[in-house]
Image: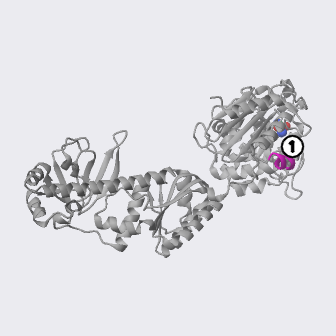
Amino acid sequence: MQLPMQDYLAELHSRFSSLHEGEVASYIPELAKANPDWFGISVVTVDGYAYTVGDSDQRFTMQSISKPFVYAAALADRGKEAVLRKVGVEPSGDAFNSISLHHQTGAPLNPMINAGAIATTSLVAGDGAEAQWRRIEETMAALIGHGIEVDEAVYRSESETGFRNRAIAWMLKNFGIVEGDPMSSLENYFRQCSILVSCRDLALMAATLANCGVHPVTGKRALPDECVEPVLSVMATCGMYDYAGSWLYEVGMPAKSGVGGGIIAVLPGQCGIGVFSPRLDAKGNSSRGIAVCRQLSQDLGLHVFARAAPPQLVVRSVYTAAESPSRRLPSREKAGYLAENAHRIKFLSLQGMLAMDGAEYVVRQMQRLSVEADSFILDMHQVTGLSDSGARMLHQARVNLHSDGIAVVLSRVRGRGHVEDPLRRALPRGDRGFLNFEDNDVAAEWCENRLFEEGMADPREVSLLADFPLFRRVPAELVEATAKLATLQRFAPNQAILASGQAGDGSIYFIKSGTVSVLVPVQDSAHQRITSMGAGMSFGEMMILGPAARSASVYADGEVVCWVLMAQDFDRLSEGFPLLKITVLENLAHDLAERLQQNNRLITVLAS
Ligand code: DON
């Protein structure tokens, strides 16, 4: 299928191909050689899908687009405070090559103007200019996703004619902003401006910023997470120099332009945009680049201040364990208890980005539901991101509800760093952490056990076969006769009692004490635990219907004692007492019907 976004970008490309305003940069002689008609657009999503149209693979020099990325490296290497002492974050409202230094400290107003960029280049880690260049090279390669190359002709051209930048570098030395040799830092600055990129590369770099510093295709972290926010902030306020205000007003995305004709724009959490067209307007920004970004923002509603999604959307569904109980098979008494109380186990299935507003809404829903709740299971499976403030709010709600006797547990968090990390960071010292379960079933079982602990104790041991649901309403003398046929068997912890697929030998198990886990095989020779059973519950009872292969495996959780009855012996006994088999079959049919109903309820919930 032709993707609609691809069609849209192609249409945009053909529409703006007729825009011929502006001039190719010529103050660096080598740049004047660019073909003014080159025109490429690329959009890369945070999951790494690249849309490209036009001259998307034509290479050109990055120029000032290198500035935010070198600034990110300086932040990563020196820390925010140290960098802020040397370079400010105020928009200058001046052109890129203005000498905008703080009147007292001499600190450049921001890292996007040349003065600030030369200063940040001098700040990246490395013993000497060569090592610093290797650090810049390595950062750029990680951001682009492949090795980099410098256009030596552009570099020489710039170095030979960059008198104004030389003056700026000496000014920075004069104020103590650049500490080492200002000329070597300046050469590194010229080199970083001369790195060759395509507009597809630019979109990938922008998408890496949109993706919290992780390259969307290589999956490798190119920048520390904590550097992304400050970098995007200076791009938003200063990235387009003396056009920054109008840009934010009309386009509304952190961005950066370069005199090579490139522009990047970042839509955090969504995509990165790269546009390339060498004709520049009077402020040194690509004319078509600006027109394309303005149109994209308008047509696709990309402005970062556009109305955000309502927080209610984070709650996908709310249901209770009455509709979706755990897959354990409770004894008759427990089933009765659950029928009365399972609605007090509330599931909140969450989705999307859980920032402060979404978390606040979730917490308020829990407060509203808490009048009738014993526990909450927050299913995080569909949560795509969790802010630190959101995590702190969930944590505080967990603590507050705990003091009201209500448990809050999480499900499906493990191994998903974007959810797990903020949750861990939210834990104050000494907090033993949150309970997290592999899946909703195990979480529901834990919550059901909690209900049982409060309302009814688990029988540790059953002393009569008559106490098993399968023998309900069977006359006592017939249960006794059946009991005589059964033998007691002991199983050691983790011992396999039944193996899935194995031909059934007719044995039916009645748990006298201990618990067992029932597992079914899933892909890759793994097993999924489907239920657990305790004293007073039976398994393998399908043998009453005739021989068949075992449908699941059963393992002893700890020491387990069972009565084992052979179906053949039972059948023989029933020949003399047909009522025995009829009643047992009725009980079996009744239990199966209940399980079917339970599954239907679950399907209804999952489908809603
Ligand atoms: O400092 C310079 O002159 C260039 N090499 C970089 C300038 C640049 O790209 C300005 N941005 N629009």
x and y percent of residue 28 in the render?
A: 87, 31
The colour scheme applied to this rendered structure is one colour
Q: Residue at image x 41%, y 69%?
A: 341
- Report whether the residue tagged 1 is closer than 8 Å to ligand 1: yes
Q: Nearer the viewer, residue 190 or 230?
A: 230
Q: Quadrant of residue 316?
A: bottom right
Q: Is residue 287 left or right of residue 510?
A: right
Name the foreground residue: 65 vs 411: 411
Look at 17% across and 65% down and name the residue there.
466
> Residue 269 placed where, x, y %?
66, 47
Q: Residues within 10 Å of mark 1 (few under 14, many from 20)?
A: many
Image point 26% across, 60% down: which residue? 515
The magenta-colored residue range is 245-251
Q: Secondary structure at mark 1?
A: loop
From the viewer's perspective, is 87 left or right of 371? right
Residue 538 vs 265, above or below: the answer is below
Residue linked to disc 1:
96
At horizontal 31% and vertical 49% (from top left) the residue drawn is: 519
Q: Is residue 313 above or below residue 281?
A: below
In magenta stretch: residue 250: yes
Magenta-drawn stretch contains 298: no
What is the total number of numbered labels drawn onto the structure image? 1
Chief secondary structure of the magenta span? helix
Q: Nearer the viewer, residue 429 or 537?
A: 537
The x and y percentages for residue 502 are: 22, 41
Res 438 visible: no
The quadrant in which the N terminus is found is top right
Residue 539 visible in the snapshot = yes
Q: Nearer the viewer, residue 328 or 358?
A: 328
Residue 540: x %, y % from top left: 22, 51
Identified by mark 1, the residue type is Phe
193 up-or-down from 564: above or below: above
